[in-house]
Image (cartoon, helix red, strand yellow):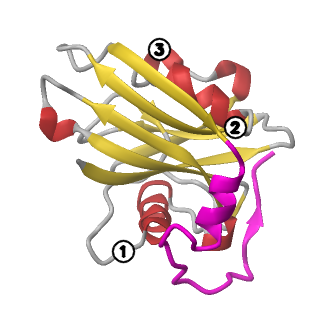
């Protein structure tokens, strides 16, 4: 199963807005999603998340601002090469303005106006939970059309998982130093 990352830039306390990207090319074309992609062999999960965010949204984040929110498994029985395990992060602080890239067109959405009908069909199950601050572990199995969800398994995790992850107890090590130029989230 392919390993990947997904980053959601959020603003407000509690969360009022989320930055999503409209996928212009490749896997998921024509859908809104967070920013992310595959983890390269030499990368930690956090480094991959930061790289993908910079490539797709043109913003910079540092490891200490990545908040680990959960793990999503996507199973496509009709297309097993699409199966993936995705590590999800939220980010409240970064530097730079989100800008369109070759792959994604970023757009801010109010939490109440997220375009779920223009996203993968699993988004309605897990995205609200993360925006409420819940840490989750989910498994989504898709129908043969590779669009609709056949089965959704959703587990809310305790906050200790995030603490263990962020402290390196799960085997993920920090490789970047502190970025003193990090700005505040969009309001």
Q: Nearer the viewer, mark 1 or mark 2?
A: 2
Q: Is residue 140 left or right of residue 158?
A: left
Between 18 and 172, the one nearer to me in the picture:
172
Mark 1 touches mark 3? (CB < 8 Å): no
Q: Is residue 80 left or right of residue 186?
A: left
- Classify residue 64 by image quadrant: bottom right
Where is residue 160 shown, x and y percent of the image?
70, 54
- For the record, the magenta segment spans 158-187
Q: Give the residue pinned by disc 2.
A: 134
Q: Give the residue pinned by disc 3.
A: 117
Indicate which disc, 2 or 3, sits on the residue closer to the N terminus: 3
Mark 1 touches mark 2? (CB < 8 Å): no
The local secondary structure at tag 2 comes to loop
Q: Give the residue pinned by disc 1.
A: 43
The dot on residue 147 is none
The local secondary structure at tag 1 comes to loop
Q: Is residue 157 above or below residue 79?
A: below
Q: Residue furthest bottom?
A: 177
Q: What residue is rendered at 46% in x and 36% in y?
A: 33
Q: Is residue 101 above or below residue 133?
A: below
Q: Residue furthest right?
A: 13
Where is residue 94 shown, x and y percent of the image?
68, 64
């Amino acid at each position: 199963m392919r390993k990947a990352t997904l980053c959601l830039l959020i603003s407000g306390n509690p969360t009022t807005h989320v930055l999503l990207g409209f996928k212009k090319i490749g896997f998921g074309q024509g859908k809104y999603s967070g920013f992310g992609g595959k983890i390269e062999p030499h990368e930690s999960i956090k480094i991959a998340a930061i790289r993908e965010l910079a490539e797709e949204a043109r913003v910079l984040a540092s490891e200490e601002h990545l908040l680990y929110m959960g793990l999503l498994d996507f199973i496509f029985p009709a297309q097993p090469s699409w199966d993936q395990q995705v590590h999800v992060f939220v980010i409240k602080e970064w530097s730079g303005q989100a800008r369109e890239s070759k792959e994604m067109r970023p757009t801010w959405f109010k939490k109440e106006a997220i375009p779920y009908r223009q996203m993968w069909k699993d988004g309605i199950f897990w995205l609200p939970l993360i925006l409420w601050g819940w840490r989750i572990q989910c498994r989504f199995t898709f129908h043969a059309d590779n669009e609709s969800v056949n089965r959704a398994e959703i587990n809310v995790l305790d906050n200790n998982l995030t603490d263990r992850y962020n402290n390196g107890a799960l085997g993920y090590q920090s490789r970047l130093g502190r970025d003193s130029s990090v700005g505040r989230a969009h309001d």
